[in-house]
Amino acid sequence: MLERFAYSQHLLEDTYLEACSEESLVIKFWAYPFEQFFERQQQLFLQWGETISPSCKNSHLNMKLDIRIILSTQGNAYDAGMGEVAKVKAQTASKFYGDKLKSALASKIHLNDIICSLPYLPPDKVNSIVLPVIQIMGLDCHVYTLRLVEKHAYLIQDAVKFSFPRSLQQMRDNGIGEYISGLHAIAEMIDKLENDINGYSKNTADKIDGLISKKNANKKSRLAYLTSPVDFCWESDSETEEEE
């Protein structure tokens, strides 16, 4: 970031940013810092570009997401975080709410799948399973959290926000520090999710107590009754950006 600010300030001018497509914005400003930050975590794979996750395909919702953070653990792959990117010229209220809705619905699908895949997750611990939802518009990034708080009730909340610094004042106001802190916040959410998946995939009940009480300690929890499906008619993402 410092190198770009010192030697390539023209990339941060309004006219240049407004000429960037979504893909250009990702390549020039977002992908590299994200990749550099997460590359040492071998269990994570960042998928850039409009892709549809297996869970969305299975739900017959063709939601193409601009970023998916895929976590590999316990022999399975989970979409642990996802979101959308909007170019500078698309920073409108309709685009903001449309992208947020799309990311939230896709995240709900993956949250449901994760909850239902954990055989030893107690019902009273369901609300501890949290997914980060990432929304990037131009050089600004907002991150939300999504969780299931009670039967059929989901909660999305603001978590952290940060920007790619483009001015000296932002640098002085700890812009780079806020950016790194934002990435740390995403990483901590995914670390916790990985710990939850690993913990609730194993039967840690006391086997002796199970024998004494004659309870089946291997009985797996079935929590699908707590979740609700995404009942939404989402049109296939087929739009392409036109040169202006």
Image: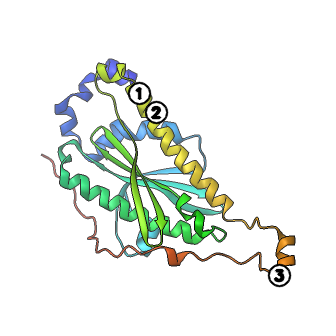
Q: Left or right: 152 with respect to 163?
A: right
Badge 2 is on which residue?
180
- Residue 174 in percent (x, y) is at 40, 24
Q: Left or right: 158 with respect to 130?
A: left
**Three-letter amino acid code at the position of disc 1:** Ile
**Three-letter amino acid code at the position of disc 2:** Ile
Is the residue 147 above or below the residue 215 in the image?
above
Query: What residue appears at the point 30 percent right and 19 percent down from the top-left corner?
Result: 168
Query: What residue appears at the point 59 percent right and 66 percent down from the top-left corner?
Result: 124
Judged by depth in the image, the label closer to the viewer, 2 or 3, is: 3
**Three-letter amino acid code at the position of disc 3:** Lys
Q: In the depicted view, which residue is nearer to us: 69 or 222? A: 222
| Coloring scheme used | rainbow
- Does label 3 or label 1 sit earlier along the sequence? 1
Query: What residue appears at the point 54 percent right and 66 percent down from the top-left corner?
Result: 114
Badge 1 is on which residue?
176
Q: Tell me, yes or no, whether the two marked residues, 1 and 2, touch with CB atoms within 8 Å.
A: yes
The CA distance from mark 2 to mark 3 is 52 Å
Q: Quadrant of residue 115?
A: bottom right
Question: Mark 1 falls on what kind of element?
Answer: helix
Question: Residue farthest to the front?
Answer: 213
